[in-house]
Amino acid sequence: MNVTLPQEPKSEHALEVARTLMRAGHRALLAGGAVRDLVLGLIPQDYDIATNAVPQQVQALFPRTVAVGAAFGVVRVVTEAGDVEVATFRRDLGYLDGRHPAGVEFSDEIEDARRRDFTINALLLEPASATVLDYVGGLDDLAAHRLRAIGDPAQRFGEDALRLLRAVRFAARFELEIDATTWQALVRLSPTIGRVSAERVRDELLKILVERHRRRALELLHTSGLLAQVLPELAAGEGVEQPPEFHPEGDVLTHTFLMADLLQPDPSAELALAVVLHDIGKPPTFSRSDRIRFNRHAEVGAEMALTVCKRLRLSRLSTERVVELVRHHLRFKDVRKMRPATLKRFLRMEGFQEHLELHRVDCLGSHGLLEHYLFCREKLEEFQRSEASAGLRPPRLLDGDDLIAAGYRPGPQFKEMLAYLEELQLEGRLTTREQALEAVRQRFGSAVRGDA
């Protein structure tokens, strides 16, 4: 099979690295995910090269290289146009730590293909002829829309348990059915995902959540048992009833899966994670009185989300964003009753557009009513059109120097004074410096009260 190579910088750069190796008499092939994408008519994000040149020979051919895994035959070629990973054909000699081979033996391209995880990721391509080389049946599997592990699936998953999550991600991304034997091994070995570091699980999980077919991926994670291993707080939503007048779609887990499906394209990792975590506070707060209730589930969920983010080793900034999205997701129900100042502070929260998107999919994934969403959109547009004095962030009418000039002694009360003035501004009750000074006098007394 032949494919068409895209005329774009990354492709040209990788091909030039391959040509340099071939001019020196070495075998050089494009390998892995890039070849899979080319077969599917997609533009690869990255290109890797497999070669019979050993690391020392690769390093001798290029002025700048990084031996990222020389013991495993991997060298990164560094140029101004970008980096290309070059790996020597190899055969892995068993795995001891569930991730890295105990050793490698340099071999040929056939052995190199057979050591990889899934058949669709083991395709090779000759740059000169654009011919795809398939030693493991990957082309047939792509044609059949099938994901299949190479060789014994249990052995492949045992070598690196992260492949359990990768199987789900590839099946969802490329709309493939997982081969029955591969699926049986995946289900049986799902508890072994606990051997994988939190950082690697996090990175794979976030890749799953930001991609278009995240709902199917979540369903595969759940039915395989992986969801209960990596996000037990989310899996706990299965079977948790919700009041049908607000949630005709069913239980908490069904609601969350629907929301994931409704997200706009290319969400941030933080928003996507917040969507799947937004209702994890419901199972522990479930109660039934006049109707089903989940009292304080947003606050409880925020604390649980903090625990999840720490477990996944998210950065401090990402953790804060996820937790705040979960904490505030119920506030939209009160927007029509908020005082102007409270509403403006809500609308100007950091990352408000993501709060708004979470609310939108929360509504569409349940009762379908968007009146609070539309109200906030209208108010945002209204405040953006208004003059600065009535906008979301009006400039201060007074600052600390102005208060000192008016005769007030600096101290903790200044913060209270300035906050009071901002409140009045947001309410639209102050527009001038003179009005602000008079408001301070009326609320806090004359300047004489603060004089020595």
Image (cartoon, helix red, strand yellow):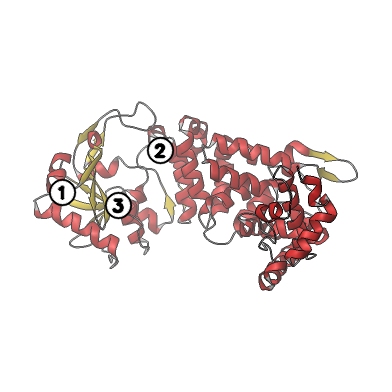
Image quadrant containing the C terminus: top right
The percent position of residue 434, horizontal first and vertical second, equals 76, 65
CA separation in Å, label 3 and label 2? 18 Å
The residue indicated by pointer 2 is: 153
Residue 17 visible in rendering: yes
Is residue 299 shown left or right of residue 161? Answer: right
244 versus 100 height, above or below: below
At numbered mark 3, what does the secondary structure look like: helix, strand or loop? loop
Upstream in sequence: badge 1 or badge 3: 1
The residue indicated by pointer 1 is: 63
Q: How crowded is mark 1: few (under 14 residues within 10 Å), some or many (20 or more)?
A: few
Image quadrant containing the N terminus: bottom left
The percent position of residue 105, horizontal first and vertical second, equals 21, 33
Q: Which kind of residue does numbered mark 3 sit on? A: Leu
Is residue 203 shown left or right of residue 58? Answer: right
The percent position of residue 198, horizontal first and vertical second, equals 49, 35
Q: Which kind of residue does numbered mark 1 sit on? A: Pro
Residue 97 sits in which quadrant? Answer: top left
Query: Mark 1 near mark 3, Cβ–Cβ under 8 Å?
Result: no
The percent position of residue 109, horizontal first and vertical second, equals 21, 45
The residue indicated by pointer 3 is: 123
265 versus 408 height, above or below: below
Is residue 74 shown left or right of residue 411? Answer: left
Q: Which residue lies furthest to the right in this view?
A: 290
